[in-house]
Amino acid sequence: MDKTKRAAIIAGNWKMNKTPSETTALIQEMKPLVAGADCKVVLCVPFVDLDAALKAAEGSNIGIGAENCHFEKSGAFTGEVSAVMLKEMGVEYVIIGHSERRQYFGETDVTVNKRVKAALAEGLKVILCVGETLEQREQGITAELVAMQTKIALLGVSAEDAANVIIAYEPVWAIGTGKTATSDQAEEVCAIIRKVVAEIYSPAVADAMTIQYGGSMNAKNADELLSKVNVDGGLIGGASLKAEDFSIIVKAANK
Ligand code: 13P
């Protein structure tokens, strides 16, 4: 497997943090710290912060993403935002299927699949999240579970569109807990996901796909996690809210 075939992507997921004015300030602080990075740098922010983020990031190497989108273009879906709306704003990326959406907002593999297809149809790049809970890991069903999540999420997605999909392996037990997967655990599951992608499409599609690790990745452990051949980047929560820490992770991906 040749890692140089793939783009390393370090993406922040701000979750429900930062107001629009705080967004502007944090991105201004981050810009000089991540300028010149060899990897792609992305910040996924709350819907209300997107406008401020796009303006603050203009002309820089930071791509902006949303944290979710609905599968319909428009309609009676109170509180939701469509991929069409994001696209018109100039948003480039969208996270779909984050475990917090699955856990707290009733997101299922089927709705994840619908959202993935809707986002790709608008030309957005999708960061698709998969990952097991601690209970599932202890049961020994991690491989089957992430394979199933990946297969259902990509059902009906063409090989051409799959080029705009990034998969983030995020073990639920490692998210916001300070408990990171070991680099071997991250590598093992990212490799399983890549194998599944090869089965669905082809080895070439799998080789080209960026597969990130997410879950308590920080300035200290990023180097080790990103050294693994199947770990092509990170989806970072807490540490993406601190300019200095985030920039250290970006630099770790440059190596
Ligand atoms: P933490 O980095 O805060 O564990 O969050 C990871 C995550 O959920 C990114 O999407």
Image (cartoon, grey):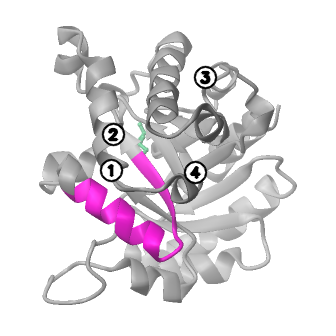
| Most frequent secondary structure within the magenta stretch | helix
CB-based contact (under 8 Å), mark 1 and mark 2: yes
| 220 sits left or right of 17 in the view | right
Magenta-drawn segment: 111-128
Q: CA distance from mark 1 to mark 4?
A: 25 Å
Q: CA distance from mark 3 to mark 4?
A: 15 Å
Queried whether the magenta region covers residue 160, the answer comes back as no
Say which residue label 3 marks.
225
SS under mark 4: strand
SS under mark 1: loop
Question: x%, y% of residue 176?
Answer: 36, 36
Q: Residue at x 57, y 71 (%)?
A: 92
Q: Residue at x 74, y 29 (%)?
A: 3
Q: Quadrant of the C terminus?
A: top right
Say which residue label 1 marks.
155
Question: x%, y% of residue 142?
Answer: 29, 19
CB-based contact (under 8 Å), mark 3 and mark 4: no
Queried whether the magenta region covers residue 116, the answer comes back as yes
Nearer the observer, disc 1 or disc 4? 1
Crowdedness near tag 1: few (<14), some (14–19) or many (≥20) residues, C-alpha within 10 Å: some
| 222 sits left or right of 192 in the view | right
CB-based contact (under 8 Å), mark 1 and mark 4: no
